[in-house]
Amino acid sequence: MKYIKQKILLFVLLFAMAMPVSVYAAGEGNIDNGGGGMGAGTGTNFWSSHDEGVRVTVVRASDGSVASKSIDLTNKQPNNIVVQFGKVSKTAYKNGTALMVKTSAYEYINPAQSLPQIISTSRGGANLTAIKQYFTDEQVIRAIAGYVGMDFQTLTNGEYKLLLEPIAYVTFEGVRTAFTATEAAKYNQLRGGMLRKKMPSLSHKNLPLAMFLETSDLGYPAWSGSKTEKANDEDIIRALGLGIVRFNEVITPEVIEADYEYRVDTDVITAVTVSGGQSDPDNSVTVTFSILGRSYKVENVYYPEDGQQLVWVKWHTPSTEQHITISVTASGGSASVSRGTITANIVDMDDNPPPNPVADDRNDSYRKENAVMPVNPEKTQAAWSVWKAKWKEKWVWHSDWNWESEDHSASCEAGCTQSHGHWEDDGEYVDEGWWEFEEKHYSASLTADMHLVTDEKAPTADGMVTKSGYGVNVSLSARASSSQTSATTAPQTAVSYFPEFYYETYWRLLERTRNGYSAVFEFKNNEYSTYYRRTHFTPVWMPDGEYRVYTCLLDCWTPDGMLSMNLSDAVQISGSLWDDWHIAPQNVG
């Protein structure tokens, strides 16, 4: 194999001899692994060794945002896959994309250079060095660049990284299924813990432990937990089942990690998973959330033996920015929670509006082609379930035989010493039934429309055409629908970004002018507007052509996470407000 002459550091497994290793390759691999014995499967729930692949996604080194389509590489030909979840990356799920079951034909690529073993089994462990060498090899990187439609030099110039995720092809409940570690954890949550119950060694140990980070990167932490024990869903989603390849030694600055990011003064939902034993009305579980000095108790949490239940609390965030810690405990039986400590950043989005525009503003360095509207992951559907316990009666007769004595009868001879009487069953029916469980499913969805229009005070605006320097107005209508409204908040936040700032630097937090599940958002009244209108002024130097505003709709919370949407609309710029000024000589005399 040919390697680019670029020095990289390969991290050594804990169980290997500690020695410095330097190689020359196209990239540097931030990957470690673990795992072990698989246990026994069943005829309808099993996985075969080497029935695996790797999902590859190009992400930006600056912020980890997705920069390419995801591709699945495998040595197999898994044409019999019936259930999959599409080509969705861990980053997309992290940013709110919902888990969606797909039954379309599964698409994959058999690379020219065969993949090394990825998932460890009881018959042999995956070779970490081989995995790193493969995904940092120049020819492999060139092939990946071609698969995703990027130039090799662009991919490796330091602005991008590769996000790797191990994939398993399994038979689950008799159906051929493909999933990454993150998808397996999310699917397990959706199915009330059934995947972990039936395939625990694969779904919650060997698959997620096939790859994890040695050093934190792209907002993902280095894994410091067990490398041989089963992990819970939350830890898998947060920190397992991923590797990162970086180029030219570009390392994303480490960000203070938090499990959640909430906006100030907002209704939110925080959720954990409780499991352990069985919880029923005879032995129920209570979960307590301690948030900002207040305790929220969720009582009568039920789930079957070896099952689990998502438990959540709805609360209101404080009005100031801060970093908080939430403590979660479970009481009753052998129950435990997936996360005993949750951290959250409370942020204020109303602290960076655009500066006051003036008529003689210039921006000679502006390049319209560089104003690329972001395509952030969105989540428009959520699903969760609640276990209900119902008693199944089974009445069984429990005998209690007793001797009932009787007096001597007239037929008895004088001096009769025989005991007279009869046996009588004084028993009773006893209910020897049991608790049966029914899983009730709920869902929520978010829809929205955004309209950008020219301001009424623009004197020469014609429909959707206006001159630069005049204002535009936005109206965003959002609707949240839910089969359990008590567990769903209304959409509460909308933030708009503008092309003159390359959709970053400055933004406007919209005002919710109609509350509720059918909400309306508009620009806040502009302090720089003569008429104090709900407007945003386009810069007078803005080139002719499309002027598109991007808006992120946020904070529609469910137990399954936050629903969000990306929206945009545009007007056309033709000319500038200076065209409307006429200067004529003054008459003298």
Image (cartoon, rainbow, N blue to C red):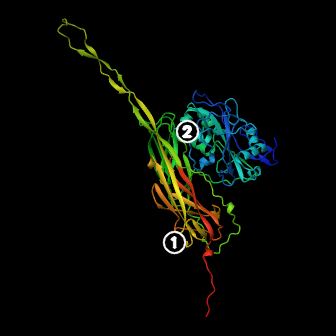
Q: Residue at x 40, y 29 (%)?
A: 433
Farthest residue in the bottom direction? Answer: 589
For the N terminus, the quadrant is top right
Q: Residues within 10 Å of mark 1 (few under 14, many from 20)?
A: few
Nearer to the camera, 414 or 567: 567
Is 71 on the left-hand or right-hand side of 410?
right
Position above or below: 364 against 337: below
Position above or below: 8 against 306: below
Position above or below: 215 against 335: below
Q: Quadrant of residue 226?
A: top right
Nearer to the camera, 341 or 280: 280
Q: Quadrant of residue 322?
A: bottom right
Is 236 on the left-hand or right-hand side of 384?
right
Q: Residues within 10 Å of mark 2 (few under 14, many from 20)?
A: some
The amino acid marked with disc number 1 is: Tyr
Chain-order first, disc 2 or disc 1: 2
Query: Which residue in the protein does label 2 denote?
Result: 188
Residue 505 appears in view:
no
**Percent x, y for residue 159?**
72, 54
Query: Which residue in the protein does label 1 denote?
Result: 532
**Percent x, y for residue 416?**
21, 7
Is 183 on the left-hand or right-hand side of 511?
right
Residue 287, numbered label: none
- Is disc 2 placed on a helix, strand or loop? helix
Q: Quadrant of residue 509?
A: bottom right
**Percent x, y for residue 190?**
53, 40
The amino acid marked with disc number 2 is: Asn
